[in-house]
Image (tube, helix red, strand yellow):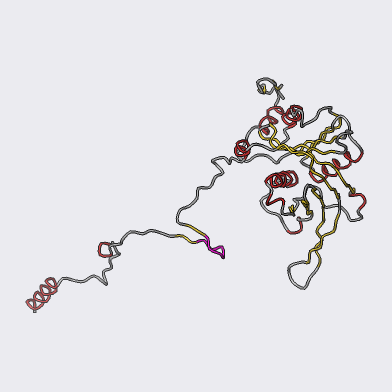
């Protein structure tokens, strides 16, 4: 792969076929790739922070990139380190773990837009129970989860609404067209209680019932994490608007004079001009064709003359 020039943000032409494929995969597309998440350790981390990052990485796999070395910088003071890592590893999401005397056991979660910082929140780990403490086996790796946002704060507070959208972006998994019933194994519940955010993970178990629809039970598989919101750095309205733009190829033009009723039936109004029935060209049949009276009289007269 070619070298990256930091000042001009230009990538040189690749010299190998593999480098060319990497650049083509990272190039802008109409339908973008699935979002990878970068896991970065700060200058100092505690055992709790390391275990929480491992648990979140298991929920995010296979769309996860882990950096094993420590990096001594603070995202809220200078985010250039994260933007460089995002461009180097082609990741749109990041989880940064750190632990200091002033802010012990902290987790910074954020996302990028065009390799620039979009949203970022700092969470303090209040309580943590590892998934190894639960006896239930974990769901299949890489399955599409069902995400539940619970709490009125996600609807009334603008900041919490953006944070809920960030969590959905983090845990939504790969983009698929359909999900079969047996493939829906993981349920991630995110509850907002004031400034506290509670993360719970369940596994669905399908049991027999008297009907075709199975009976569903939820069993907690972990991890169980309680966060407390410390700081946030959200995108401005203009930057958020640019991030939500949809390419013209994917936009569907609204059809006029169409609406949908309560039952989901599509109704449309068609405007038809006045039809002139007299001038419509119809199919002419010999059996239905009327003969002229003059022709009939001429034939009868000719027959009488011959006789």
Bounds of the magenta segment: 260-266
Q: Position of residue 33 (x, y in %)?
A: 68, 39
Q: Quadrant of residue 262?
A: bottom right
The answer to whether 138 is drawn above or below residue 46 in the figure is: below
The answer to whether 11 is drawn above or below residue 45 in the figure is: above
Asked whether the viewer can see residue 190, the reply is no
Asked whether the viewer can see residue 297, the reply is yes
Asked if residue 265 is among those painted magenta in the image, a careful observer would answer yes
Going 89% across and 49% down the picture, which residue do you hit?
131
Going 89% across and 56% down the picture, which residue do you hit?
136
Q: Position of residue 72 (x, y in %)?
A: 84, 27
Viewer-closest of 24 and 265: 265
Whether residue 3 sits left or right of residue 261 in the image: it is right
Q: Position of residue 74 (x, y in %)?
A: 80, 30
Going 82% across and 60% down the picture, which residue do you hit?
218
Whether residue 20 sits left or right of residue 305 in the image: it is right
Asked if residue 23 is among those painted magenta in the image, a careful observer would answer no
């Amino acid at each position: 792969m070619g070298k990256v020039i930091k000042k001009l943000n230009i990538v040189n032409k690749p010299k190998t076929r593999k480098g060319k494929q990497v650049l083509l995969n990272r190039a802008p597309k109409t339908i973008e790739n699935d979002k990878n998440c970068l896991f970065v350790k700060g200058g100092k981390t505690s055992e709790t922070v390391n275990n929480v990052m491992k648990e979140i990485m298991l929920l995010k796999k296979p769309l996860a990139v882990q950096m094993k070395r420590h990096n001594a910088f603070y995202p809220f003071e200078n985010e250039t380190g994260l933007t460089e890592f995002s461009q180097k590893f082609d990741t749109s999401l990041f989880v940064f773990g750190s632990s200091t005397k002033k802010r012990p056991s902290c987790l910074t979660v954020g996302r990028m837009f065009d390799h620039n910082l979009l949203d970022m929140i700092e969470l303090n780990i209040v309580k943590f129970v590892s998934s190894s403490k639960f006896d239930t086996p974990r769901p299949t790796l890489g399955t599409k989860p069902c995400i539940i946002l619970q709490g009125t704060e996600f609807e009334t507070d603008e900041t919490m609404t953006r944070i809920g959208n960030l969590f959905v972006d983090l845990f939504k998994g790969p983009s698929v067209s359909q999900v079969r019933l047996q493939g829906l194994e993981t349920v991630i519940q995110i509850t907002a209680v004031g400034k506290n955010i509670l993360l719970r993970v369940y596994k669905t178990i399908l049991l027999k019932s008297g009907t075709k629809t199975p009976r569903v039970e939820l069993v907690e598989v972990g991890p169980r994490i309680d966060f407390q919101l410390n700081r946030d750095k959200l995108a401005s309205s203009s930057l958020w608007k640019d991030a939500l733009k949809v390419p013209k190829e994917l936009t569907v033009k609204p059809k006029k004079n169409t609406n949908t009723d309560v039952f989901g039936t599509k109704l449309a109004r068609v405007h038809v001009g006045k039809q002139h029935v007299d001038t419509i060209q119809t199919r002419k049949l010999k059996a239905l064709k009327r003969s002229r009276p003059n022709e009939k009289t001429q034939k009868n007269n000719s027959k009488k003359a011959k006789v």
